[in-house]
Amino acid sequence: MTRAEGKRLRAGVAFTSLWIVGLAVFTAYPVAASLFYSFCDYSILKAPVWCGLENYRQLAQDELFWKSLRNTLFYAGLSVPLGTAVALGLAVLLNCEVGGRSLFRLLFFMPSIVPVVASAMLWLWIFNGKYGLMNGFLDLFLSPFGLHGPAWLADPSWSKPALVIMSLWGTGNAVVIYLAGLQNVPAELYEAAEIDGASAWRRFIHVTLPAIAPVVAFNAIMALIGAMQLFAQAYIMSEAANGNGNASDGNPARSTLFYTIYLFSTAFQDLRMGYASAMAYVLFLITAALTWMAAQFSRGRYEDSP
Amino acid sequence: MTRVHKGSRRVAMGLLLLFSAAFVLPFVWLLSTSLKPIEQTLSLPLTFIPWAYTADLGGKRVEVTLDFQVTQPGAVVRFLAGEDAGKLGFLGARQLASGSVPATVVHPVAAGSWHVTQRLDRALGEEGPAPLWDVLPRDRIDSRIRPRWDNYPRALAALGGDSASDRDRVGFWTFLGNSLAVAILGVLGTVISNAIVAYGFARLKWRGRDAFFALTLATMMVPFPALMVPLYGVFKALGLIGTLLPLWLPTWFGSAFNIFLMRQFFRTIPEELSEAARIDGCSEWRIFWRIVIPLSTPVLVVAALFHFIFAWNDFLGPLLYLTRKDTYTLALALAGYQSQNGGVQWHYLMAASAVTILPVIILFLFAQKTFIRGIATTGTKG
Amino acid sequence: MSPRHKACLPLLLAAALPAGAAQAVHVTYWEKWVGFEAQADQAVIDRFNRSQDRIVVDYSSVSHTDRKTLVATAGGDPPDIAGLNEQNIATFADAEALLPLDDFIRRDGMTNTEWLSRYYPVYARICSHAGHVYAGISTPKVMALYWNKTLFREAGLDPDRPPRTLAEFDDYSRRLTKRDPATGRLTQVGFLPQDPGWWPWIFCSWFGGKLFDEQRVTFASDPRNVAAYDWIQSFTRDYGLDNVKVLSSEFGPWASPSAPFFTGRIAMVFQGVFYDNYIHQYKPGLDYGVGPWPEAVPGVTDFAMAEADVLVIPRGARHVREAWEFIKYVNSANPDARTRDELRGAELLDYLQVKNSPLRVWSPFFAEHNLHPHIAMMRRLSASPNVVSAPDLGIWQEYYREVISSFDRVRLLDATPREAMAFSQSRLEKSWERYRRSLERHGQWAALGETAP
């Protein structure tokens, strides 16, 4: 190494030194420790005892683990496509030359920055089976037939759809992104299509969609990663749905036992930190796979010349 | 922008109005509930308007609550015998005619009248004379719109729980202070540390830089829940469990996403500016501080705003690390408010939620453009 | 309070108090209560703080006290005293999160047996685990049958004679159930197992079943437990699932004026000693009676359930001796108290919280001037040989969750009792096996095994 190289290296390390410490203490060590604990019987109060693959073996046989995974996939499988569709639809509508566009954009975006605890409280109230806004609205259509809206969060078959509906309210983030993506589609493409006499729908399918597909795919996968980590709203709402103040079981009837809730209660309620670490690692692998997919979609978009 | 026909534009406008109504209605519901008296939050049919009802009871004009509508005609009576002798009560027409309950009629009541009770703003458990009541036709009850703004101070006062000891009585202002401390210290940490680190990645050439940067990007895929357990151990070893530090200290040591965001921006600043400064004998630190930072305000503001919102809204972090009430953030206190009050007082809960939402909405309205540009760039280019 | 203010507090106190008190040890105490129970706690603490000049107990109301205590103990910064639920004791003790109180008791010149014999047996059982005393009682609770006398009268039943046997209970429940003749919808039910639905396992014990048999989980294998869940499901079958859903959609929270027992939607409930306070608060004037659970197993009279909130010292607490002094105070009383001012410790707390005392000996004032309208019944049930409490089991939290989950599935007709319970049983067997192995690994099993129930 020449002196100049050495000097540059020192400067580089000096500038990134905070991150070197941060990476080591707040990421690298936890990732390694988590892996170690996942092979241990560990409760934080007692010293970890090595138990090999036992945690992973138990995980494979743990009905609740699978249930939490199924619940999470159900939620993600519903909220991500619906959220993407709604956001894309709204973005397309906004992209028509309509008046008041920035006001609409503002209105759609606002819910997405509402603190999740506050929006959980609000939706808890909206989904109240008797006095809630949702059933008040639905009953306008249902009561002529002698029907009544469901009990939502108190009903195991409606609690997850309720959370999905709530997630749609927070989809404004994606609206903004997709709108920006739509605005980046070169106008010449549309003009060419128009000259060819393509209908608006065909233009959307053949011009718009291919042009913004990478953005949509990337953001949908990011949303999927987020949905896999669903915690706060489900935790708060299930605590309230039960009434006896214990959220660790995903009430009612474990219908909202999501992956991160099970992980949290295993670790910090049952103090089974080793088992929780094994769960954490499985989540880590799932997320890594999804991220890799996202990277495939966005490959080349942020690779710039050195 | 897509050019569309006038007709389709009208359809689009209609759809947008419909959807924006769906997005705005929850906010309206939140506000309307927060301004109602408790019994109106639990009454049907639903209304968005907070009412005040008044009626003449016992010769006095008093505020009343509408309890229920009587379905059959009958009378308000005074009982003559039995345990209830001397008390007032309501008897249906058939019971009255059968004479099975000895009573004298005070006044007759038509079907569809309302049972009303005097509204006493007494704290639970507080003793006092029993409230007056009567059964009156709807046209003898006045209604006018009256938002209860005093729900707000009451909800905030109840946020910390009505603990018996003064020392323990922490409340809204403590929570607000904690939330602000965590958010502001976190914003400072985010902006300062990530700018320094990103400069090292963006504007300096050194051996191992690209490999290290790839590693940095790779850490973005580690989900926080996967790190909860060992991170808890780290902060235990540092003796910080139960303090606010675990919530903001890590921001002073960089984060992959922000490093990436800022690096991308720094690279758009012409290299010639740095070169010229280097020839003039400027140190890297000086170039960073005097040239790059002043040109980078947009990205710094975006990172600051994002972090503020994240810190303000965070629930899992405070849930994990905070044990004492005097360290609670507003979000955590709000979540606790719901679980510590057996019967949910929706009007107070909505008022407290509104107060928690307000700062981020204000921040957003002030920095709307930056926000939207920030979201759009990170979502489409990052 | 900001850290800076906290730092100021001792200084202010030092300036304000006489010199001796400046050296007083401050004991931190986390408790779940807010409202009037917290005021009662504070009154007891004030009395304790004034009774001597070495110790000052500082009360903090903390929601989810159990999880917060565990997290703080694991994090190395626990309170000196934590107010937990009794169900936490075994789990926390096995996790080595609690300090046994045996040494303190011995230092005070008593054996564990002597110390525990001052309580009614059920509360003595609650305080101990694996041969050690881990807790003192803060708030004892007895659950009894509450019935609405007005509805009894309407149904032509004797309002002063509650059902005495299970068959009678079922019969009463049918006679107290009303439907809207036009729609067939329920307007009132005699009994609904899910209200309040907090302790579904008690129905198993009531039917004579066992939840744990020396070394094994017996949730599904004990036919009496299955019979209890069959009985629970029979209510949904009789009423109709939709009818129950519609009816219960009108129920307000249990502690509100619109709670179904207060609005006359449900005629009989099993509730705790604390329920009278809520009746007084939300439905003053309700005409109701309180009695033992009907005989479900012939010969088992005065059946009831007891549980308690307890005081423990987490491991790693800084002022353990002072913490013990306070726990001892709250678990003793002045047996000669003849006026309110002479009440001490447990009796003062229970008098102010309007509950029963866990101690066998009651002072004349506490017994005679108690504000609880049914205190005699509560005392009779506390002393009953047939009062039961939750099993002393390290996996009880998981067990409880399974019990609830099965209960929900059964009452919502999602599964037959046998199916739901077998599912829970297989999970619990695995959990117990894992738990036992973990204790073995840490060398704790032998100690636990010796004293296993």
Image (tube, coloured by chain):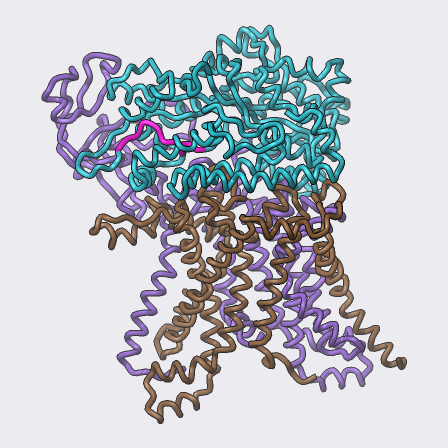
Chain colours: A brown, B purple, C cyan
Residue at 50%, 26% (x, y): give it: C209
Q: Is residue C190 magenta?
A: yes
On the image, the x and y values in percent for residue C274 come to: 47, 24
Looking at the image, which is closer to me, A218 or A39? Answer: A39
> Vertically, is C219 above or below C143?
below
On the image, the x and y values in percent for residue A20 come to: 76, 65
Looking at the image, which is closer to me, C187 or B309? Answer: C187
- Left or right of C68, for residue A193: left
> Vertically, is B345 above or below C326?
below
On the image, the x and y values in percent for residue B110 come to: 13, 33
Residue at 77%, 26% (x, y): give it: C23
Looking at the image, which is closer to me, B7 or B57? Answer: B7
Q: Which residues are magenta?
A: C187-197
Q: Which quarter of the picture shows residue A89?
A: bottom left
On the image, the x and y values in percent for residue A138 come to: 29, 53
Q: Which quarter of the picture shows residue C109?
A: top right
The answer to whether one can see residue B154 in this image is no
Residue at 18%, 34% (x, y): give it: C181
Q: Is residue A64 magenta?
A: no
- Quarter of the figure with the N terminus of chain C: top right
Residue extending furthest left?
B97
- Quarter of the figure with the C terminus of chain C: top right
